[in-house]
Image: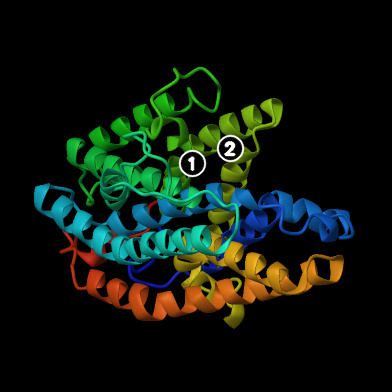
Amino acid sequence: MVDVAPNNRLVFIDALRGVAAMGVVLFHAEEGHHIPELLVLLPYWFQSVIEHGNLGVPIFFVLSGFVIAHSLYGQRMNGNLFGRFTLRRSLRLDPPYWVAIAISIGFATLASTVVSNRPSETFTLGQVVAHLFYLQDILRYREIDTVFWTLCFEVQFYLVYAILLAVGRNDPGSRFQGRRTAALLLVAGMVSLLWPLRLGPELPAGLFPPLWHAFLLGVGAYWSWRDRGALPFFAAYALIIGTSAIIQGDQFSLACTITAATLYVVGVADRLHTALNWRWLQFLGAISYSLYLIHNPITGASFRVGYMLTGRSIFWEAFWWSVSIAACIAVAGALWWAIERPSTRLARKIRFSSSLDKSRQLVPTTP
């Protein structure tokens, strides 16, 4: 078991968040057909980066598994801790998300008014309420913003993982959190393999099991980093998912596997606290949640207004693309500073009282 304090900042994680968020921003500029003429002139490798920017989503899912496992590793899960954990996640996620919902509705309504021949946008009370509680996909409401679907899965990942720890009566003082917890998570991992192997049943929209393996890969990477005894299980799990992904051309699962393996390798190299500690990339990592939430309406508005002013050409596509990226970062920075940063500070006031003495928690364990 490696010597790591639970609250130490993992700068490599923040850097990957920034990379993932910016990848999604670039992807949606291409997916929205905002830069078609410019895109064909870009180098092939850059085109490929942009066209695969949506793989920032599986990176986010794996990072979530790693970070949540990190935050709960030294805690004995019970009803009280589950409540505090849920409240802390809510305080962390909800305020920026709710503001992003309002921004998306506002921009959509404004666009319907300003842009000729654009259909009027309508949002029902049920649709908005469902979004507030991350239930829109399960309740079959249309997404207010296409990026919001990932949050519905993230919330399910967090809650189910915490519930599994509680049901397993995890013991932070025991290796692998105790036999029952280890066995329960092992079973959960085996069941999760059904979907990347294309053997799982088709479930109603919005339910987490088809993407559960992404989160568990992050959990496995973290547990293996903390205790090498978990490595054979994590390696087998990742190998099965990665091999299946290559055979089936499943880019999502392959990105998950590569991300999880990278986290483990960087952790073993003792670089999670130092790697990619570049100021600009750490800034992108800090605002990555806000950037992910609001980039779609800002990107659309930047190009729409820009092309109304100048018309379209290769030059103007490049110009307004640069403007849209700068606008996304600026608005995300403002949202982070005004909403996300205060909500994060408030969330951190919800303390997890450790159930394990730190001197025992950090004793090295050999495989």
Badge number at residue 253: 2
Left/right placement of residue 139 relative to residue 166 reads right
Left/right placement of residue 8 relative to residue 181 reads right
Residue under the point 49% across and 25% down: 195
* Element under disc 2: helix
Q: Estimate the x, y position of residue 354 in percent, counting from the top left.
A: 18, 62
Here the colouring is rainbow
Q: How many marks?
A: 2
Residue under the point 76% across and 59% down: 35
Q: Residues within 10 Å of mark 2 (few under 14, many from 20)?
A: many
Q: Estimate the x, y position of residue 150 in percent, counting from the top left.
A: 44, 47
Q: Estimate the x, y position of residue 194 in percent, counting from the top left.
A: 48, 22
Residue 349: which quarter of the image? bottom left
Residue under the point 58% across and 29% down: 240
The CA span between labels 2 and 1 is: 7 Å
* Element under disc 1: helix
Q: Quadrant of the C terminus?
A: top left
Query: Front-most of 82 and 126?
Result: 126
Q: Residues within 10 Å of mark 1 (few under 14, many from 20)?
A: many
Name the residue beneath numbered marker 1. 214
The kind of residue on which mark 2 rests is Ser
Q: Is residue 334 above or below residue 107?
A: below
Are dots 2 and 1 in contact, CB under 8 Å?
Answer: yes
